[in-house]
Image: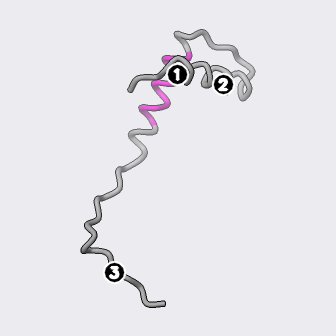
């Protein structure tokens, strides 16, 4: 996944605010990539639901 420069700068600022550590762009790229990889492993995609499978609930 590509991390855009403005996203990387936001990550650097958030990291500094949270941990009081200023990352270089290279360190931030590495840590942000690891975080995104971790999140992608933890989140399972939702199953596709066909419109015909949805039941309307009576009011």
x and y percent of residue 45 in the render?
A: 35, 50
Q: Secondary structure at mark 3?
A: loop
Q: How many marks?
A: 3
Residues shaded magenta: 28-38
User: Would you place residue 40 above or below residue 48 in this image?
Assistant: above
Q: Which residue is mark 1?
A: 31
Whichever of callouts 1 and 3 sits on the residue coming sooner in the sequence is 1
**On the image, which quarter does residue 13 sit in?**
top right
User: Would you place residue 5 above or below residue 36 in this image?
Assistant: above
Q: Secondary structure at mark 2?
A: helix
Q: Secondary structure at mark 1?
A: helix
x and y percent of residue 28 in the render?
A: 56, 17
In the rendering, which numbered label is found on residue 15?
2
Eye-nearest disc, 1 or 3: 3
Whichever of callouts 1 and 2 sits on the residue coming sooner in the sequence is 2
Which residue is depicted at the point 55% across and 20% down?
Answer: 8
How far is disc 3 from disc 2 in space, using C-alphas?
Answer: 45 Å
Answer with left or right where residue 21 lies relative to residue 24.
Answer: right
Question: Is the residue marked by circle 1 packed among few (<14), some (14-19), or many (20+) residues within 10 Å?
Answer: some
User: Would you place residue 2 above or below residue 51 in this image?
Assistant: above
Which residue is depicted at the point 63% across and 13% down?
Answer: 23
How far is disc 1 from disc 3 in space, using C-alphas?
Answer: 44 Å
């Amino acid at each position: 996944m590509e991390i855009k420069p403005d996203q990387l700068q936001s990550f650097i600022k958030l990291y500094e605010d949270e941990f009081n550590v200023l990352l270089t762009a290279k360190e931030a790229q590495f840590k942000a990539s690891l975080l995104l990889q971790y999140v992608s492993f933890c989140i399972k995609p939702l199953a596709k639901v066909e419109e015909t499978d949805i039941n309307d609930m009576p009011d």
